[in-house]
């Protein structure tokens, strides 16, 4: 990925398939951590191995760190095919309002 970032760019969008929030809650073995504790992805929990939200958050942050990206140069977004079901992250348009309308 790094060779593609040699040229100037505005932002890097980490795009993940969205899943309904109820699935994140359902897969939490503790039933009291995911999306119920403030900053849940950053607080140690037995739920992390099964939490999609935690995994995409950590993947984005680790890739950004490895590439040496500034905090403001990367955005996370999800794309849900089913529409208005609440997902894990904002849809691409609200996560990155400066991104092109069609990507």
Image (tube, helix red, strand yellow):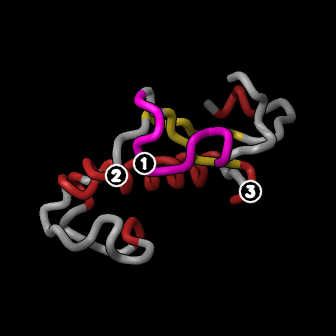
Dot label at residue 86: 1
Which type of secondary structure does the marked residue at label 1 adopt? loop
| Earlier-in-chain disc, 2 versus 1 | 2
Mark 2 and 3 residues: CB-CB less than 8 Å, in contact? no
**Residue under the point 34% across and 44% down:** 20
The residue mark sitting in front, 3 or 1, is 1
Residue at label 3?
72
- Pick the residue in front: 16 or 74: 16
Say left or right for 48 vs 40.
left
Q: Position of residue 66 (x, y in %)?
A: 57, 49
Mark 2 and 1 residues: CB-CB less than 8 Å, in contact? yes
Q: Quadrant of the C terminus?
A: top right
Residue at label 2?
21
Q: Around disc 1, counting alpha carbons within 10 Å, would you say few (fewer than 14), some (14 to 19), or many (20 or more)?
A: some
- Single out the residue that lies furthest toward the front: 84
Overall secondary structure of the magenta stretch?
Answer: loop
- Single out the residue that lies furthest toward the right: 8
Q: Position of residue 70 (x, y in %)?
A: 73, 56
**Residue 94 part of the magenta segment:** yes
**Residue under the point 44% across and 27% down:** 81
Q: Position of residue 48 (x, y in %)?
A: 26, 60
Which type of secondary structure does the marked residue at label 3 adopt? helix
| Earlier-in-chain disc, 2 versus 3 | 2
What span is in magenta? 82-95
- Pick the residue in front: 20 or 75: 20
Q: CA distance from mark 2 to mark 3?
A: 26 Å
Say left or right for 61 vs 22.
right
């Amino acid at each position: 990925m790094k060779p593609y970032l040699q040229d100037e760019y505005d932002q890097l969008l980490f795009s993940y398939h969205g899943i309904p929030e109820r699935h994140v809650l359902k897969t939490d073995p503790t039933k009291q951590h995911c999306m119920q504790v403030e900053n849940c992805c950053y607080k140690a929990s037995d739920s992390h191995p099964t939490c999609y939200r935690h995994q995409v958050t950590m993947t984005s942050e680790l890739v950004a760190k490895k590439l040496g990206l500034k905090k403001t140069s990367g955005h996370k977004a999800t794309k849900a095919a089913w529409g208005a079901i609440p997902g894990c992250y904002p849809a691409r348009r609200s996560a990155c309002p400066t991104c092109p309308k069609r990507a």
